[in-house]
Amino acid sequence: MVTKLTDTVRYIGADDLDLDLFESQYIVPQGMSYNSYVILDDKVAVMDTADARKADEWKANLKEAIDGRQPDYLVVHHLEPDHSALIEWVLREYPSVTVVASAKAIQMLPQFFEDIELDGRTLAVKEGSELSLGSHCLRFVAAPMVHWPEVMVSFDELDGALYSADAFGKFGALSKCGFYGRDDDDWACEARRYYFNIVGKFGGPVRTLLDKTSALAIRTIRPLHGPILEDNMEEYLGLYKIWSRYDVETDGIFIACASIHGGTLAAAEKLADILRSKGAERVVVSDLCRSDFAENVEDAFRHSKLVLAASSYDGGVFTPMYEFLHRLQIKGYCNRKVAILENGSWAPSAGRVMKEMVGAMSNIELVDPMVTIRSRMKKSDIPALENLADAIL
């Protein structure tokens, strides 16, 4: 779809409603958007391309938007294939176009396009570089490791527009979730899941980018995924500050449970009841075996406290818990209070493995005592769960 954002800026991105897994791992029940923009000034700048899955739609949108004009620049903020798949086509279709990107991105381009001809057709930009299009002038800000090393963002002072690459993106097609952030019923939910699973490991680089852009008079954010953000800028920027610092967004307890035959889950749910009876205002229980792993990662980062409840398995821990903790490790989970509930019928081992995995994370406070259930929760286990609840709270 082509959408007029201003007199001189058009949205030319595409929605993907048939995608089963984003990055071949994340479920996207509301689809995904591949955002792209065109600035129509004295010079014409195309701001990123799209995924090959939507090539025909994106090409048609581009041609409609430029209406016979020739693009002068193709600005590449991020080289990941869901945004860059059509670069080679643009170079062939428009022989006079110049690719504008970081030096690292230009260096990496031949990795994605075997026969691409770049001689004399690139312009490397760096921190502080500017590109005048006429009334519009793009000022570039380096954003390495948000979340690839070649990433740049750009700021157009005329519109107060930050072209933010993958920062401020979210899961969901615009036709499902709303074209603008104000139209999105719950932007934070899928933006949070997107952030912690895709960008979240790189909190330091995100903080650096936020510091660099804090002096800019940002009135709108135009990301590569998800709705355009115009209203409530303080809310969006505030959430990114919390997320990038690994701070607590919601005071509450997330109980992540991996149960084989239901005994561990029953104990986890009993613990949740006890916590609520003792005044905990927010307790969320998730069955790791039957829920979206990316949402579980999101909930772990969102809440102030985490309870790990798992069955022993093959001398270790039940695999859904192992996979969950592995995800937390590689995403940089830190700065939280963690309690452990294990189950074992003859040789409990889950607690040991969970402690080892959590121990490898940064600034984690382990709650004592760890509680061990033998096969099924019994009345005699209730006092231990009561003590654990007190320690968590």
Image (cartoon, rainbow, N blue to C red):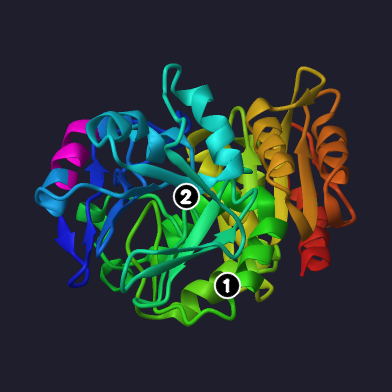
Q: Give the SS element for disc 2.
A: loop
Give amino acid for label 1.
Thr
> Can you see residue 273?
no
Going by the image, does 42 lie left or right of 146?
left
Location of residue 283 in the rendering, given as x and y in whole percent from the top left corner: 59, 63
Alpha carbons under labels 1 and 2: distance apart: 16 Å
Which picture quadrant has residue 377?
Answer: top right
Question: Residue shown at 83%/47% (left/top)?
Answer: 361
- Mark 1 packing: few (<14 Cα in 10 Å), some, or many (20+)? some
Q: Note whether 353 is above or below 111 in the view shown.
A: below
Q: Are marks 1 and 2 in contact (CB under 8 Å)?
A: no
Disc 2 marks which residue? 77
Q: Residue at x 25, y 48 (%)?
A: 71
- Name the side, left or right, on which 4 lies relative to 360: left
SS for callout 1: helix
Tell me the amino acid under the disc marked 2. His
Image position of 374 with respect to 229: above or below: above
Q: Is residue 58 magenta?
A: yes
Q: Pick whichever, 190 or 98, lies toward us.
A: 98
Bounds of the magenta segment: 55-62
Residue 146 located within the stretch drawn in magenta? no
Q: Pinpoint residue 196: horizontal percent, then vertical percent.
A: 58, 52
Quadrant position of residue 330: top right
- Which numbered disc flags the more N-terminal residue, 1 or 2? 2
For mark 1, what is the residue?
213
Magenta: predominant secondary structure element?
helix
